[in-house]
Image (cartoon, grey):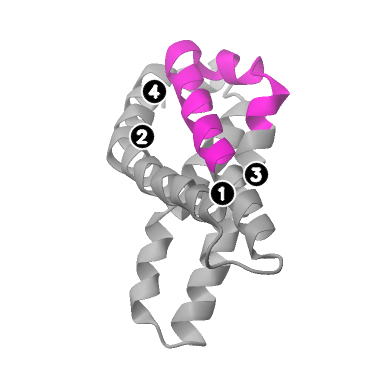
Amino acid sequence: MDEHLHKRWMGIAGLLVGLPTAAAGGTVAVLGLIFVMDGKYLSGNEPTVIVLWSLAGLFGLLSWMWLTGLFLWRGRDGLRHSPLVAWVGLVLGTLAALGVIAATLYFTFKQSEISTLAFLGLGPPLMVMAGHLAWLRWGQAVPDSAKAG
């Protein structure tokens, strides 16, 4: 697939999947930070865990938006020249999304809370798109001779 068409599909996926996921996940992450600042219902290590989880999720969302915009604007060369901090944020967001998956599986199967399956919309869909960005950055480019024939 040529880069122009690839950018188009990436933009469509970002609008249809990425932005709603970023809005929902970002809202929950900010609510987590607000919940910690209120501090009425937390004890022990809970505030620390929630702050780290929320911040990792927010950094991941911002990094995903940054790198996706960079790809749509400058293509694979833009991703190859992107700063390391954007990729670190993407890794932190992936870790936060893995935490969402773990919590969802725990509450769904151990606590029999079927409604917690909705948590899977709070960040895990961006893991696929983040992986795709990493593949675009570090994957092999198709040589021009292979494109022609």
Residue 73 vs 135, above or below: the answer is: above
Location of residue 60 by image quarter: top right
Residue 61 as seen in the image, left or right of residue 94 = left
Q: CA distance from mark 3 to mark 2?
A: 19 Å
Q: Is residue 71 magenta?
A: yes
Q: Is residue 111 magenta?
A: no
- What is the span of residues highlighted in magenta in the rendered image? 58-87
Residue 19 vs 81, above or below: the answer is: below
Kind of residue sitting beneath label 2: Gly
Residue 55: % across, % down:
60, 43
* Residue of label 2: 14
Q: CA distance from mark 4 to mark 1?
A: 30 Å
**9 or 66, which lies in front?**
66
Residue 143: % across, % down:
59, 19
Q: Is residue 140 visible?
A: no
Q: Residue at x 62, y 27 (%)?
A: 137
